[in-house]
């Protein structure tokens, strides 16, 4: 009689597959086998060992040298002739079941061990790749820091300059600024080691310059500048989570790591010592307030004052104001940002635009007192100036970073021969908008527009406005553009009276470069205005190149960015003002 092995019905183990080690059996990791068949089973494992070693020539993988296979058990059972001993048969059968169970367990453990090994290998590979990418990032960071020490010209470089850098190794932020006299030196040594943009790291001036943009020749510390930090937070709370990355990838999931709408707070490390007051000309009320403010700032706060030459001349009749400084030459105006801690404007929005236009590079924080009719960008009340300035000088101050557009005219760039540079006009940094329009011409203007080299459209109408979000409530609004919160990064593309039924305004992302070109075959010429001023003519073939500038205007908020914006929209523009419907009358069903 032949005995059928229970292993023949085993679903999990395939034929001939090694299931267990005989050593494991002998070392007691298999269940103890008792009874007359103990010897037989042990000899079975021994036999298997010998057979396997003969078959493999002693070359076994993963340490599974002493193996027992399903086939060898079956073979043995077939060879075994069963006598009359029914009890022995039952015992033998039970023993074989126990062996089968043990063999299955060992097979399962082997599978688990292999899975675990594969998982560890995967983790190791991921860790190795992460370390390699960190090393690469570190190299890029070092290169960028090196570049900042000998910075590119921001007006000729295609890359927008960054105002801040990614987190350093210890989780601190290392700010990077450059051009026009601002260089981060010893980025970590002078740093306050706290989160945010730190002026101590940023501020270094140099003595010599060439033309509009100065090159670093001699570096000196700026002793007279007050130092401050800009920190990211939300609703008044400093956010420890601010990261430079916008998108993070974790376990294959994409999430936004930071939002652009964070409220920025300015924290003075040392109190401001010098302010520049810019006042609307020919306004007796502005002049009177300017004089009062100078007295208060000097006597109560010990703060020095700079004025524009016309205003200084106007008040010099009184000896008291001899102490007021002024920026007489163009060179001095270019260096103003290294001397003043705060800019105060007295007037309307036009005065804020004027103040911004004085700074061709970095702009100190601007505090605007309302002395005009609308005051969209002038949130502070002039009759409460002492209280306001007291709070601002003490800090912290909420800041709206009002972005500017970097605009330049290229004269007939298509006609320029290879290797020659096209003739470029002066750079204009606009806070509101650049408008390309028909000017005095009675002809329809015709403008071809490209965005990062892609053809956008041909404007046929009175012209086109390229506006900042801050300018969205000015000319662009009048031309049908949308109102945009000043912290939304973008460039508004708004046609002026287009002769088309389907030309709607667009908002483009802040990183694009826009080119507006007058076609050679255009009937008339076009004109360009920068914040409503400095008109220049465009002839056929001339182009205007426009992109986001590296230097925003940090405007102090009266409350905070969004509250101030919505209040200006409601109170300044009377947006959606309508008498409330009465509750009496028919009730709709
Ligand atoms: N059709 C129009 O609405 C139109 C036409 C030309 C110029 N402008 C705007 O005038 C600006 C120049 O201002 P200005 O004071 O030197 O000239 P301005 O004296 O002619 O005043 C223009 C008006 O626009 C308001 N204004 C300016 N900037 C604003 C802003 N960002 N948000 C809301 N209102 C704003 C001013 O308060 C002022 O009432 C230009 O940048 C342009 O935006 C508007
Ligand atoms: N310091 C300055 N020097 C020369 N021009 C200035 C100066 N400040 C303002 N301006 C110009 O004066 C004009 C009027 O200024 P502003 O808009 O501030 O006053 P406003 O018209 O009374 O105010 P609002 O626009 O709120 O009615 C603007 O065109 C502006 O460019």
Image (cartoon, rainbow, N blue to C red):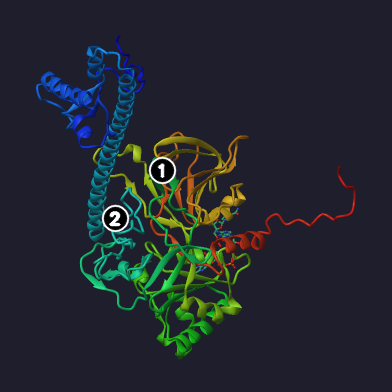
Q: Is residue 417 visible?
A: no
User: Vertically, is 477 above or below 500?
Assistant: below
Comparing marks 2 and 1, which lies closer to the viewer?
Answer: 2
Please name the residue that numbered disc 2 is placed on: 153
- Quadrant (top left, top right, bottom left, bottom right) of the C terminus: top right
Name the residue carrying label 1.
Answer: 543
Which residue is the extreme one toward the top? 1
- Which of these two is toward me, 75 or 80? 80
Q: Position of residue 179 (x, y in %)?
A: 30, 60
Count every numbered label the image shows and give the total: 2
Is residue 281 shown to the viewer in this render?
yes
Mark 2 vs ligand 1: CB below 8 Å: no
**In the displayed structure, does residue 447 sit left or right of residue 148?**
right
The CA distance from mark 2 to mark 1 is 21 Å
Label located before the other in sequence (2 or 1): 2
208 relative position to 287: left or right:
left
Q: Secondary structure at mark 2?
A: loop
User: Residue visible at 68% across and 56% down?
Assistant: 575
Quarter residue 62 falls in = top left
Which quadrant is home to the N terminus? top left
What is the x, y in percent for residue 383?
A: 61, 79
Residue displayed at 14% across by 19% down? 51
Do tag 2 and tag 1 residues touch (Cβ < 8 Å)? no
User: Which residue in the rendered view is the most extreme toward the left?
Assistant: 57
Q: Which disc number belongs to residue 196?
A: none
Residue 6 at x, y percent in the picture: 34, 19
Q: Residues within 10 Å of mark 2 (few under 14, many from 20)?
A: some
- Secondary element at tag 1: strand
Ligand 1 - quadrant of the structure image: bottom right
């Amino acid at each position: 009689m032949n005995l059928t092995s229970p292993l023949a019905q085993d679903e999990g183990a395939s034929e001939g597959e090694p299931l267990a080690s005989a050593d494991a059996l002998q070392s007691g990791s298999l269940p103890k086998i008792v009874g007359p068949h103990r010897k037989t089973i042990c000899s079975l494992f021994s036999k298997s060992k010998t057979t396997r070693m003969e078959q493999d020539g002693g070359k076994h993988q993963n340490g599974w040298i002493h193996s027992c296979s399903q086939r060898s058990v079956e073979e043995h059972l077939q060879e075994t002739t069963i006598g009359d001993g029914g009890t022995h048969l039952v015992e033998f059968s039970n023993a074989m079941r126990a062996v089968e169970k043990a063999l299955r367990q060992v097979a399962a453990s082997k599978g688990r061990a292999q899975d675990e090994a594969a998982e560890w290998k995967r983790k190791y590979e991921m860790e190795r790749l992460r370390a390699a990418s960190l090393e690469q990032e570190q190299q890029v960071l070092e290169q960028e820091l090196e570049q900042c020490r000998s910075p590119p010209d921001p007006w000729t470089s295609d890359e927008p300059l960054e105002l801040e850098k990614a987190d350093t190794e210890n989780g601190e932020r290392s700010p990077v600024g450059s051009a026009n006299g601002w260089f981060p030196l010893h980025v970590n040594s002078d740093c306050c080691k706290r989160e945010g943009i730190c002026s101590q790291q940023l501020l270094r001036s140099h003595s010599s310059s060439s033309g509009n943009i100065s090159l670093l020749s001699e570096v000196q510390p700026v002793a007279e500048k007050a130092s401050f930090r800009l920190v990211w937070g939300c609703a008044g709370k400093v956010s420890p989570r601010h990261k430079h990355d916008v998108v993070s990838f974790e376990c294959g999931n994409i999430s936004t790591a930071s939002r652009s709408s964070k409220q920025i707070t300015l924290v003075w490390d040392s109190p401001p010592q010098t302010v520049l007051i810019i006042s609307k000309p020919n306004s007796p009320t502005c002049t009177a307030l300017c004089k009062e403010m100078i007295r208060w700032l000097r006597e109560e706060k010990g703060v020095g004052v700079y004025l524009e030459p016309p205003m200084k001349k106007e008040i010099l009749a009184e000896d008291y104001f001899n102490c007021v400084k002024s920026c007489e030459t163009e060179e001095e105006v270019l260096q103003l940002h290294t001397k003043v801690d705060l800019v105060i404007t007295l007037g309307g929005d036009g005065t804020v635009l004027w103040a911004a236009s004085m700074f061709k590079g970095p702009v100190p924080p601007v505090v605007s007192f309302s002395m005009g009719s609308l005051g969209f960008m002038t949130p502070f009340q002039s009759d409460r100036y002492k209280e306001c300035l007291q709070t601002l000088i003490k800090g912290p101050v909420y800041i709206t970073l009002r972005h500017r557009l970097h605009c330049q005219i290229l004269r007939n760039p298509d006609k320029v021969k290879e290797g020659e540079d096209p003739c470029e006009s002066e750079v204009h940094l606009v806070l509101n908008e650049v408008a390309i329009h028909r000017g005095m011409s009675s002809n329809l203007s015709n403008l071809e527009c490209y965005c990062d080299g892609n053809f956008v459209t041909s404007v046929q109408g009175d012209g086109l406005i390229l506006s900042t979000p801050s300018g969205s409530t000015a000319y662009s609004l009048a031309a049908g553009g949308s109102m945009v919160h000043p912290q939304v990064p973008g460039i508004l593309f708004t046609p002026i009276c287009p002769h088309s039924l389907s030309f709607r305004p667009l908002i483009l992302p802040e990183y694009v470069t826009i080119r507006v070109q007058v076609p050679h075959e255009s009937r008339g010429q076009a004109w360009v205005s920068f914040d409503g001023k400095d008109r220049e003519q465009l002839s056929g073939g001339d182009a205007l190149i426009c992109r986001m500038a590296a230097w925003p205007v940090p405007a102090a908020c009266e409350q905070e960015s969004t509250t101030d914006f919505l209040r200006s929209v409601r109170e300044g523009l009377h947006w959606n003002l309508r008498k409330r419907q009465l509750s009496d009358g028919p009730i709709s069903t």
